[in-house]
Image (tube, grey):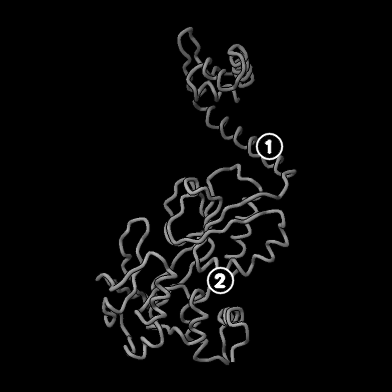
Amino acid sequence: MQAFAAVVESGGLTLAAQRLNIPKGRVSRRVSDLEAHMGTRLLHRTTRSVQVTDDGRACYEPCVRVLGEIEELEHRMRLVNEPLQGLVRVDLLPPIARWIVAPELPEFRRRYPSICLHISTSNRLARLVEDGLDVSVRGGSLEDSTAVARSVADVRMGLYAAASWASLRGPVSHPAGLAARDRIGSISVATRTVRPWRLERHGAIVDLLEPPGVAFDDEESALAASLAGAGVVVAAPFAVAEYVYRGSLVLVMPNWSAGVRSVSVMFPASRHLALRVRVVVDWLVDVLSRSSDMRLTPEALHHALRAPDRLDPDAATMFGRNSGHAHP
């Protein structure tokens, strides 16, 4: 089957022999043996060319599929004895690295002491092969055709501003009340354009197309500007819960959200991932999928502060971890 597939893919016996590193006569005999076993002619051979028959075309794809399954089985068997050690390069969104992954690292180190993690943080779309990465965690649409993406969470984004800004600006009940100067925008690293704001409430959608007064390509810088009183920023609740708890930030327009951002774990589209990479991928998927912080909504965070005696379990987990003590 390997010889037959090599002939079809290379277009001749000579090239197939070079590809398989065996004599040309042996390739021909192996194809003849397969034809005898199948009871049909798969190739028309002449002194000048080799042509695939109709039966050969029908046989080719199933042969490739079977060969792929055998190759995958052999690879998995070799992995059984592969030591869990070595370097894995991971790139994370900054808030996920800080609030979700970092607290789980002691347990990872206990389970896999010989795996070395090099973790970088960025907001740009990572290209795994080009950037020399093994794993990446990203939000939004994924455009890397060389990668596989495993969706782990849908994060509902909220609108936040410094308490000082909110007290000076006064309450805002509708998106129309947010002028361009009130908003801190986000610049797409891929397109270098400012992302439009799409706000949602109970099925109603309002698009704010006017460019904001200031925009960043880094979420941490945008959050810092908002904390300083520069305006309203779009953020994930888990990334700002500590600031909300302390009173530094407040939720703007609690009944509106800035949509949902899907979060995925990305890794190379190769069946033959090293075992250490597979382990890290599975660990990240598990950590992010079961994280109550990732499921925290703007509404839960808002209502938890207004009614601490009926604290939402997700918000309670976030407050307990970030503040270092129980909610009063």
Label 2 SS: helix
State which mark lies toward you, 2 or 1.
2
Identify which amino acid the numbered label 1 is placed on: Glu
Residue position marked by numbered label 1 in the rendering = 74
Label 1 SS: helix
> Depth check: 205 or 193 in front?
193
* Percent coordinates x, y for residue 206 in the rendering: 30, 74
Q: Is residue 138 above or below residue 176?
A: above
* Percent coordinates x, y for residue 262 in the rendering: 46, 63
Q: Is residue 154 above or below residue 297?
A: above
Quadrant of the drawing holding the N terminus: top right
> Depth check: 34 or 246 in front?
246
The disc placed on residue 99 is 2
* Percent coordinates x, y for residue 75 in the rendering: 66, 39
Name which residue lies at 33% across and 56% down.
Answer: 191
What is the distance, in whole Å, between disc 2 and disc 1 at their CAs? 39 Å
How many numbered circles are shown?
A: 2
Identify which amino acid the numbered label 2 is placed on: Trp
On screen, residue 178 versus residue 296, left or right, reads left
Q: Is residue 278 above or below residue 294?
A: above
* Percent coordinates x, y for residue 149 in the rendering: 51, 54
Quadrant of the drawing holding the C terminus: bottom right
